[in-house]
Amino acid sequence: MTHTSSTDGFSPLSDEFYRTYAAHVKAQLPGCRDIAFLNPNGTVRWSDVDASVLDERLLDRLRACLSATDARAQLIDPARLLAIFPLAEDEQTLGALLASIDLHECESTDDAIERIRSRLQPLLDRMTRDLIETRRPRSKADELTDRTKELQWLYGVTAQLHASSGETAAIQSLLVASVERMNASYGALVIPQRKLNLRYASRILADDDAARAHQHSLRNLLAHMRRWTAPLLLNHPTLGPPGVPLRKTLALPLVELNGKLAGVLVFYKPLSLPDFGRRQLYLGRHLARQMEALLNTRHDLATGLLTRIAVEQDALHIINTRPEDPHCLAYIDVDQLHIVNDTLGFDFGDEAILRIANLLQAPTLPDDVIAGRLAGDQFVVFLPSCNSIHALQYMQRLERAANTLAVGLPSQRITLSVTCGIAKLRRGPSAFSKALAAAELACRTAKAQRRDRASAQPRSAAPPSARA
């Protein structure tokens, strides 16, 4: 195995850095036998290639491709080729990956290169960014340029998210993109009050122990964030739970509008990879702010439920993807909340709203429901792929569960109750608003007839009268 020191303006990187990337390349390409990383001048920086493969004339031809942007290859024998993949950014060559790869049967060299490049490109992009982080010295102008690139990337990603904001996975998509951009192996977004726990393990840099590291460190991270509400950058950890490998960590706090900690956005990577640096810290701060904005737009701060517009976006997305299925919308109103506020105070009124909000999920309702808070004591629940009969049964179950709740001091307890209205939700102009108005009318009718009842949308123009 050959190793050479760096003399091209890069900070020296450990053999483990190249060994890690070599392992990931081979994981992406099962037919890859040997790997070498070249310096920009064509010398071998690190290699596990058999010396007999590195014919100097062949290498000279491949080195000539270092200034090119496309991959090149030469056949070693009819079933094997030696390919070179430049690592470059902004027309600056940072080096190259050299790989000996078995050809598929009846596969041409051009087809093989295209197949290999498409599979390796995300990994090559990550390694390029890691190499950029090792350049020295870094001027102020370089840092400003890096920050501009990160903001441009973030703008592009969030623009795509807003374009498809009807998808429930909008925030998950941002987390996925962030993990890859950060050159991390694992990322998580945790908002305890909203019961939000999103995680993503990189498909490019496999790291089997990262999930365990996150599980064991989460409580301490949240405690640290509650105390300091500031980013935590930990590149050289020395202590950790027994049996859990240490990980480089970058954690960013997410803060609510009232200044309290909402949760944490955290990234991990193996110790063999370059440190999280200023560039990642800068991007991380902006990612946290972007996620705060998304959460505040899509979530009600008091209950953690979705907002009305977020429920509508997600519901219409599901309706458009499942147009043949029946779908229902439920309008839910807490009965006589003003009595709780007047008798016990607004703190107990807020507690009543929160306790009802906690019922709008499994096991009371199906796992796939989308629940939101409209305003005050009014809620909306979208029941996908659910007919009106089953929707009515779910709302009856919700009413029974609400009747088991009470707020107030032991000497002055008030039992809670809700009234629900149900409407079918179909495709069409203003479909959500029309269904919500019909469900609200059904709820008001049920409330007028007798509180603590659910009502289904009428089939005719007559007032709804069906009750649980």
Image (cartoon, rainbow, N blue to C red):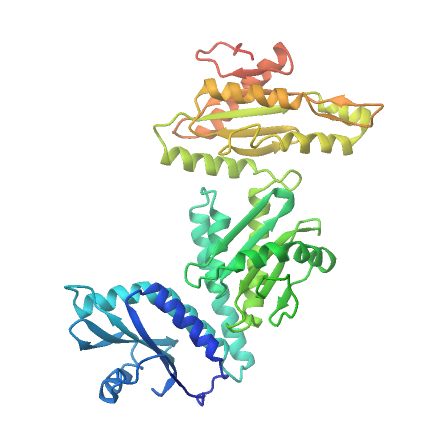
Quadrant for the C terminus, please: top right
Residue in the picture at 38% in, 65% down: 122
- Residue 363, image x, y percentages: 56, 30
Q: Is 90 placed left or right of 451 in the picture?
A: left
- Residue 184, image x, y percentages: 50, 64
Q: Which residue is at the far front? A: 243
- Residue 206, image x, y percentages: 44, 62
Above/below status of 104 relative to 176: below
Q: Is 468 placed left or right of 40 in the picture?
A: right
On the image, which quarter does residue 431 sit in?
top left
Above/below status of 468 relative to 136: above
On the image, which quarter does residue 108 sit in?
bottom left
- In this orientation, does residue 311 appear? yes
Residue in the picture at 82% in, 28% down: 409
Above/below status of 127 relative to 244: below
- In this orientation, does residue 339 appear? no
- Residue 270, image x, y percentages: 52, 67
On the image, which quarter does residue 36 sit in?
bottom left
